[in-house]
Image (cartoon, grey):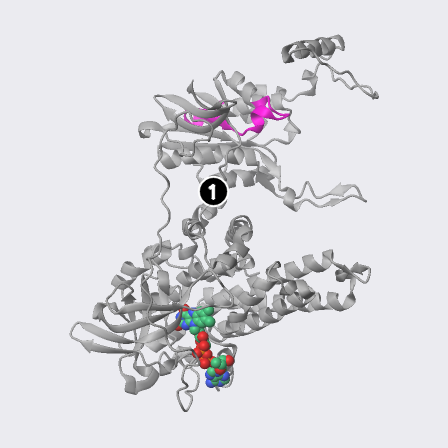
Amino acid sequence: MFFNEDHNNIRELAREFAEKQIAPIATEIDHTDEVPQHIYDAMAEMGFYGLKIPEEYGGLGLDSRSYMCVVEEICKKSIACALIFSSANSLSSAPILLAGTEEQKQKYIPGIASGKEFMAFGLTEPGAGSDAGSMTTKAVADGDYFILNGRKTFITGAPFAKYCSVFAKTSPEKGSRGISTFIVDMSLPGVSIGKQEEKMGQRGVSVCDVVLEDVRVHKSDMLGEIDRGFATAMKTLSIGRIGVATQSIGIAQNAIDEAVKFISERKQFGQFLSDFQALRFMIADMETKLNAARLLVYNAAYKMDMGEDVTKDSSMAKYYASEVAVEIVGNALQLHGGYGYSKEYTIERLWRDVRVLTIYEGTSQIQQMVIAGIVLKPDGAAPAKKPDAPAAKAEAPAAKPEPPKPAAPPPAPKPEPPKPAAQPAAPQVSAPVKPAAPAAPPVAKDGAQVNILVCVKQVPNTEELKVDAAAGTSNLDSIPSVLSTFDACALETAVRMKDANPAVKIVALTIGPDKAKDVLKSCLSVGADKAYHVNDAAFGDLDSLATSYILSLAVKKIEELEGAFDIVFLGRQANDTDSGQVGPQLAEYLNYPQLAYAREVSVVDGKVRATRETEDGFVVVDAAMPAVVTVTKTEYDLRFPSVKSKMAANRAEIPVFAAADLGPEAAEAWSPAKTVKTYIPQRKTGGIKIEEETGELSAEKLTALLSDAGVI
Ligand SMILES: Cc1cc2nc3c(=O)[nH]c(=O)nc-3n(C[C@H](O)[C@H](O)[C@H](O)COP(=O)(O)OP(=O)(O)OC[C@H]3O[C@@H](n4cnc5c(N)ncnc54)[C@H](O)[C@@H]3O)c2cc1C
């Protein structure tokens, strides 16, 4: 109802990334209080920082629901990993998008969208939290500059921020109507970072004070008109609240999953906890409330995408989802009993992580004030429609409360700026080494054009396999296909060659039923330029001989369209498993040399070069091109696609060849008539043990036996 195919694809990508890359290290992130740089780099590569940012400023220009799908999936595994890219799409970029000039947008937003430059959001002060309008940070005009003095507190990501949007009083006598917004370069003289807050949860992302002492900010770095900054802050928060609401439903879902797992495995009073009705009812309540929250959140995002004023909707979503999430996680912890109080269980972290969601970006009480303020207005109109009447402003307390915080610590030395996305190691051709495997990526020499075909196979995603042993049934036919892990190595090897040499062109090919198209889309999403699908119901289950024959016909057919291939890649299973004839057979049908057990692959002096592991270490082998290359299982994991390439792959047209398209010979290839004799061994107890002196002699003996039996 709220989502289209693109949203579902983006969600799937984020879910896979969260499950494979984040879940295994989520506890470690909490323990070490640090999100590894490679996670930030991967998310930057995938485009997460610019999901909602317009394309003209380096983002993907997607809608709020796309952003929400990603935040929800990442937060299911670790909210710490979501905070910075979530902020990039809201609190970091929104003030500039809302109030900035074209020049400011061009200057600051691309860095935020790429994940290379983080911009913190500096609104809260020690004495001005919910009542942000009572801030005391001042900006005084001085020629072409403003001089800023003050202290911002609880600023997320301040230690690695390159910039901070700072809200400061330019006309103190006007209260909240005298606030302006400035982009402060964190390296300016007078800017320092206070000590890092020791937070109870959301460990991995630092929250610090930002201290401003006579900081000279050029007037070109003021955002929007003078004295109009408070409206910018409130509008930004209204956008950001949908993000916090989404964080809430992500964490709550994780909590329910953890609770269900726990009570389904633990027994008390002789039965599983999940069999106690009282606990089942708790789960029912948790699930119902989560889904109610989810609808509010999705609805707010949908309305935002429709261009509606969502001041009330985003406050309702943030208020309800965060309150319900705190309740759900608390109940999920309760269901764990004493184990929920132990750091060994995920729920303990979730309980600490979730607690702040009813506090930051406007407490629940502030959301209630916003909602009530709109409902109680005669026309129900959102105050946000009047820019000078901020949506979330609380009634100013009579006296300014002193911050109930310990005395401000002296500014700490400024930490290192954010680390940009890691650059791949310089490519080089590996020499034979012993005993460790060479680690450098492969390279194609001289940037020469290299045409690569990667043959891939779809296999059922066994993670989704459900077997009903009693009924003797399974969902095997209906579960989605995934790329065989061996073929994924071959594909990644080819894509690495393309990284090193953009003149490498990759075509993916599969033989399989309709759903095999999904694995071709996976190939396109990570770097294949084209994909072809051979699909004919008449093929049925092809044996390896027929597979290699059909592949050879398809290769010839595709060569007519794409030009001759230099390398035909196959995964390891084409060489050293029970279907291991496909590699050698395909090489024979094509009349190409075969290079098996390849690891690092490159093209050098017109030859394909591969590193191979032997008993003595590694050797380098060259083969003339064109060649069939079977890639052994490497340590390479297939890369994650970017959001953009995943969406493009999903829309790509994939040509399909039926048997007839491959020529009349194809119809013969899998014919049962070709089978001379099928040997069905009689059931016997025991068997014949062949134990000759050498393997060769044993093979001879076996051949003789099979020949006598008429099998060969
Ligand atoms: C982890 C974390 C990250 C943060 N990141 C940022 C950031 O990046 N940038 C930033 O600017 N700020 C940030 N904040 C600050 C956050 O937005 C504030 O903590 C929040 O707005 C509440 O302000 P306060 O802490 O001063 O609480 P207070 O405003 O002092 O509120 C205390 C209590 O009083 C209630 N209350 C206050 N006024 C009223 C009223 N009129 N009626 C009824 N109840 C009321 C509140 O709801 C709350 O329960 C962050 C905070 C945390 C904890």
Q: Give SS at disc 1.
A: loop
Task: Residue 64: give x, y in percent of width and height.
Answer: 46, 62
Measuring 36% from the left and 39% from the top, which residue is drawn there?
425
Residue 15 in view of the camera: no
Assign the N terminus to one quadrant of the image: bottom right
On screen, residue 666 versus residue 467, left or right, reads left
Measuring 51% from the left and 31% from the top, which residue is drawn there?
509
Task: Residue 543: give x, y in percent of width and height.
Answer: 64, 24
Measuring 62% from the left and 42% from the top, which residue is drawn there?
461
Amino acid under disc 1: Arg
Q: Nearer the viewer, residue 214 or 232?
A: 214
Task: Residue 410: give x, y in percent of width and height.
Answer: 33, 72
Using the image, determine if residue 579 lies above or below residue 114. above
Q: How many marks?
A: 1
Q: Which residue is mark 1?
A: 639
Measuring 45% from the left and 52% from the top, which residue is drawn there?
36
Q: Residues within 10 Å of mark 1 (few under 14, many from 20)?
A: some
Using the image, determine if residue 15 lies above or below residue 238. above
Residue 312 in view of the camera: yes
Q: Nearer the viewer, residue 193 or 218?
A: 193
In this view, the residue farthest toward the left is: 143
Assign the C terminus to one quadrant of the image: top right
- Magenta stretch, residue numbers: 556-582
Task: Residue 542: give x, y in percent of width and height.
Answer: 64, 26
- The quadrant of the rendered image in which ligand 1 is seen is bottom left
On screen, residue 261 versus residue 438, left or right, reads right
